[in-house]
């Protein structure tokens, strides 16, 4: 008895994991608390992993007894995760100096481990592997969220995130036990075929067990993407966590969770398409309204961006309510382009809090006078977050709304548009603070070089993909073609 | 005979679960949890899953219970700390418990589980488990070691003096 292991397929994740171990060891023996070499090692690891991922991007297959899948979908999400992790690490270099933590190497190592977990989530179709991968991402992000130990808000963040995350994981496992108990499989493809096999006794009495299983299993991913009613952790955790980690939480676990949801629904349970459509319509409407209406009341920018990211999850979920190629490719475009303007906005928040300002909206008063660069780039990111052309934020939303109208859910698209209008109000309110309100302090804001680098990369991405979205839309179309039940 | 034994264990387990949730003394909570875990092990033995039963006793009932006891003893509140429940959240506690319980009862009673006739043979259980872990589930098994490392590193990061 033996199994075939294709190490080339395993390589990207393995490189990230080995990189994490190397960061831990180098921090221990050679580069004790040396920020820049450790960060360079981390980024180099991620670049190698990204290169390897691109190298296997033409291939398709599975390895390690079907535990790991290499297909366009997993490659796409792995690239999203790797690129955003690189940006987050760059954002952390200047930030972590000011944090003065004694656990510097562990910070970078935990980021690498959590991202490896996210990559495994994006590339597996097995319930057991999925659980381990989810826990790897979650444990890493719990600890990173609590890195500002001197700050009670950070302590609150880690505790809330940890306890609620545990409950979500427990519910997911309970759901998995229903699915396994009923079908006897842990592989999504086998589960799907045993459900649709003609004459199987499973089909005749399928309803309750499988419905309970699927709904409970999805809870952990609703929690990760912060869909209402599993969103309560978001404002507190986003506020308390170190700002680069807030950016991390708003991009990487979410991307992984969307990848898993796409796989669960399109590969695992296409038999329940009618039921989960209703589920996602209801969730999408609730998530959009709660996120946008609550964001109107916020005075802290991290909480505001937290609620706005809840609203964004609502728009993306709308893509799951419509089952079509266009909807799925809209989700991919949204998730991929989201990394630019989301991380960009958080980069500016980090740059400001690094220069001694707090995160309240008052501190953005007159930003245009104190730092025209930060104010202008923030304005571009706000337009993108609101989803207006000619920025990258427009295309994901446009594709998903278009798919909704095509799929006969035009009223859902209208609700989405209403929400977009609501969201413009609070995004423009930030712009008003930056450009119209007089500043309380007059001194200029110095932006360290790495923050500048991240802001430049993200702003170029936001504008470039906003004007020329053709490439990314084409890629998403080829990824979606032939995926699962489509 | 098996059925009667099962019901006895199930009743012990439920009473212990109830004590875990309601008792005010932390040490009593841990002891009640110990009984829950031991009765789970008993059910594993009844299903001929003797490896899982032993692991359950060794790791959960043994190691984890002792560790939780240590935590209770070493925290500043000490073993005499009494858990208090906020009066304001009590109604919502009861409500959510009842809703979840009712939903689960409804679901479970409406499911027709596919019934098998094969009984696990005592001698192959451990072997089957080993082949599954080291062949079919090799990758998750290996990643679990990284997961434990992350938990370890994280505990050090959080507990370390700045």
Image (cartoon, rainbow, N blue to C red):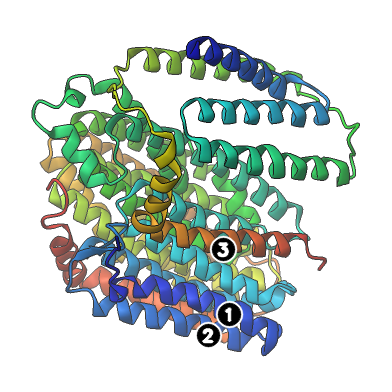
- Mark 3 vs mark 2, foreground winner is 2
Instruction: Name the quarter where the C terminus of chain B is drawn.
Output: bottom right
Q: Nearer the viewer, residue A178 or A57?
A: A178
Q: Horizontal placement of A357 versus B161: left or right?
A: left
The x, y position of residue B114, in whole percent, is 27, 23
Residue marked by disc 1: A23
For the residues beneath circles 1 and 3, the answer to whether they share a chain is yes
CA distance for labels 1 and 2: 7 Å
The x, y position of residue A259, in whole percent, is 32, 54
Q: If you read the primary sequence from the N terminus, does the residue marked by circle 1 or circle 3 appear first?
A: 1
Given the image, what chain letter belongs to the residue carrying mark 1?
A: A
- Mark 1 vs mark 3, foreground winner is 1
CA distance for labels 1 and 3: 18 Å
Secondary structure beneath label 1: helix
- Looking at the image, residue A204 lies above or below residue B139: above
How many numbered circles are shown?
3
Residue marked by disc 3: A245
Quarter of the figure with residue A390 = bottom left
Q: Nearer the viewer, residue A290 or A139?
A: A139
The x, y position of residue A477, in whole percent, is 14, 61
Residue marked by disc 2: A41
Q: Residue at point 71% right, 45% down?
A: B63
Q: Is residue A231 visible?
A: no
């Amino acid at each position: 008895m033996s199994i075939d292991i294709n190490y080339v397929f395993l390589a990207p994740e393995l490189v990230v994991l080995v990189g994490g171990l190397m960061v831990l060891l180098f921090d221990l023996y050679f580069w004790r608390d040396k920020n820049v070499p450790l960060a360079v090692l981390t980024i180099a690891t991620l670049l190698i992993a990204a290169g390897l991922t691109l190298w296997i991007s033409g291939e398709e297959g599975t390895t390690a007894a079907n535990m790991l899948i290499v297909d366009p979908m997993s490659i796409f999400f792995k690239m999203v995760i790797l690129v955003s992790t690189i940006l987050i690490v760059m954002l952390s270099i200047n930030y972590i100096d000011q944090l003065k933590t004694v656990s510097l190497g562990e910070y970078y190592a935990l980021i690498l481990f959590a991202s490896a977990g996210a990559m495994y989530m994006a590339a597996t179709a097995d319930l057991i592997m999925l659980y381990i991968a989810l826990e790897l991402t979650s444990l890493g992000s719990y600890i990173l969220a609590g890195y500002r130990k001197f700050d009670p808000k950070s302590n609150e963040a880690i505790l809330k995130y940890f306890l609620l995350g545990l409950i979500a994981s427990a519910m997911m496992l309970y759901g998995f036990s229903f699915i396994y108990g009923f079908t006897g499989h842990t592989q999504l493809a086998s589960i799907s075929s045993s459900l649709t096999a003609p004459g199987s006794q499973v089909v005749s009495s399928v309803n309750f067990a499988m419905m309970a299983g699927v709904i409970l299993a999805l809870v952990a991913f609703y929690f990760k993407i912060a869909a209402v009613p599993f969103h309560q952790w978001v404002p507190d955790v986003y506020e308390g966590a170190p700002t680069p980690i807030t950016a991390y939480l708003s991009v990487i676990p979410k991307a992984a969770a969307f990848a898993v949801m796409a796989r669960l629904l399109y590969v695992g349970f296409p038999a329940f398409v009618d039921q989960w459509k209703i589920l996602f319509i209801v969730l999408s409407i609730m998530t959009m309204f709660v996120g946008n209406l609550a964001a109107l009341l916020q005075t802290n920018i991290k909480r505001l961006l937290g609620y706005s990211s809840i609203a964004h999850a609502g728009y993306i979920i709308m893509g799951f309510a419509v089952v079509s190629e266009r909807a799925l490719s809209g989700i991919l475009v949204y998730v991929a382009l989201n990394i630019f303007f989301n991380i960009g906005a958080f980069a500016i928040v980090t740059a400001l809090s690094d220069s001694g300002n707090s995160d309240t909206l008052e501190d953005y008063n007159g930003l245009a006078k104190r730092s025209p660069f930060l104010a202008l780039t923030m304005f571009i990111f706000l337009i993108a977050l609101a989803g207006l052309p000619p920025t990258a934020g427009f295309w994901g939303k446009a594709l998903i709304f278009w798919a909704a109208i095509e799929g006969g859910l035009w009223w859902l698209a209208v609700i989405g548009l209403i929400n977009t209008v609501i969201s413009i109000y609070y995004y423009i309110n930030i712009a008003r603070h930056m450009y119209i309100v007089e500043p309380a302090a007059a001194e200029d804001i110095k932006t360290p070089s790495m923050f500048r680098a991240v802001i430049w990369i993200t702003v170029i991405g936001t504008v470039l993909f906003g004007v020329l979205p053709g490439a990314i839309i084409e890629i998403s179309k080829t990824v979606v073609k032939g995926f699962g039940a489509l | 005979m098996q059925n009667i034994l099962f019901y006895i264990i199930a009743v012990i387990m439920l009473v212990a679960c109830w004590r875990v949730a309601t008792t005010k003394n932390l040490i009593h909570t841990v002891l009640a949890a110990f009984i829950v875990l031991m009765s789970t092990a008993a059910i594993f033995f009844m299903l001929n899953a003797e490896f899982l039963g032993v692991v359950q006793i060794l790791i959960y009932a043994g190691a984890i219970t002792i560790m939780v006891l240590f935590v209770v003893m070493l925290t500043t509140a000490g073993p005499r700390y009494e858990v208090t429940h906020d009066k304001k959240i009590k109604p919502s506690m009861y409500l959510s418990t009842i809703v979840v319980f009712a939903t689960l009862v409804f679901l479970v009673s409406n499911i027709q589980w596919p019934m098998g006739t094969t009984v696990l043979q005592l001698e192959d259980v451990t072997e089957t488990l080993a082949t599954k872990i080291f062949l079919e589930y090799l990758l998750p098994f290996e990643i679990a070691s990284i997961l434990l490392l992350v938990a370890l590193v994280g505990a050090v990061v959080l507990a370390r003096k700045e």
